[in-house]
Amino acid sequence: MDQIKIGKFIAERRKNQGLTQMHLAEKLNVTDRAVSKWENGKSMPDSSIMLELCGILKITVNDLLSGEVVTMELYNKQLEQNLIEMIKEKEEANRRNLVFENVIGILSAVILFGRTFTAAFVSMVEWARICLIVAGFVIGFTGLLFALRIEQTAGYYRCGVCGHRYVPKYGSVLWAMHFGRTRYMKCPKCGKRSWQKKVLTKDEE
């Protein structure tokens, strides 16, 4: 999606409704800075307020995502194109998040083992050794749990039995046996346990 085009469209429709950025922000319970970022193409309105924004601007969501008022003749074609682009952007975001998860996981492991190694082999007073070990475990495990949260929400897990793709609960991912990003979990659709692989898309490939 062309965020610059969408931003200019939002600004145009806002002015047509006789609203300032501040007035629009107050109606949506956001800051005028957020509205300014939309109109400058630096960010997109959150999905939770998109319908309300469209109602205020008297446009459809399809118009908003297209950056123009879509004629009825082109409506279905433009809607399909917008949906495809949204899916692609979500997949790319999931891909970036999984890379970020790797970075966090590696850094957390380095901190955990690095501090433990230092405490074990470097000469220091006992209280400093204990503080170093505790700090290493707290920082390391917090980072690893955060990385696991990213893995849980980025993309989907595919059931090895029925092929159903879903986002599992955090506890299921946390306590499941795993090999890399493949985890042994119970499918909410067929109810069977299997090794489930992480995938980026919701639909069958």
Image (spheres, rainbow, N blue to C red):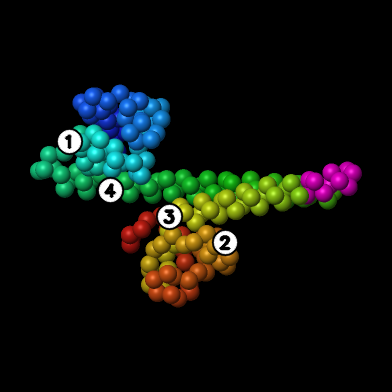
Residue drawn at (47%, 62%), measured in percent from left and top? 168
The amino acid on which the numbered mark 3 sits, given as a three-letter code, is Gly
Vertical placement of residue 155 versus 160, above or below: above
The amino acid on which the numbered mark 1 sits, given as a three-letter code, is Val
Q: CA distance from mark 4 to mark 1?
A: 19 Å
Q: Position of residue 70 (x, y in %)?
A: 16, 38
Mark 2 or 3: in front is 2
Q: Do labels 1 and 3 touch, CB within 8 Å?
A: no
Residue bearing the label numbered 3? 155
Nearer-N-terminus badge (3/4): 4
The amino acid on which the numbered mark 2 sits, given as a three-letter code, is Leu
Tag shown at residue 69: 1
Nearer-N-terminus badge (2/1): 1
* Residue 70 sits inside the magenta stretch: no
* Residue 129 sits inside the magenta stretch: yes
Mark 2 or 4: in front is 2
Q: Quadrant of the N terminus?
A: top left
Residue bearing the label numbered 2? 174
Q: Position of residue 93 (x, y in %)?
A: 42, 45
Residue bearing the label numbered 4? 84
- Circle 2 crowding by C-alpha within 10 Å: few under 14, some 14–19, many from 20: some
- Circle 3 crowding by C-alpha within 10 Å: few under 14, some 14–19, many from 20: many
Instruction: Say if residue 126 shows up in the picture.
Output: yes
- Circle 1 crowding by C-alpha within 10 Å: few under 14, some 14–19, many from 20: some
Q: Position of residue 83 (x, y in %)?
A: 27, 48
Residue drawn at (24%, 42%), measured in percent from left and top? 61
Q: CA distance from mark 3 to mark 4?
A: 16 Å
What secondary structure is found at the residue carrying circle 4?
helix
Q: Main secondary structure of the magenta part?
A: helix
Vertical placement of residue 181 versus 120, above or below: below
Nearer-N-terminus badge (1/3): 1
Query: To which quarter of the image does residue 29 belong?
Result: top left
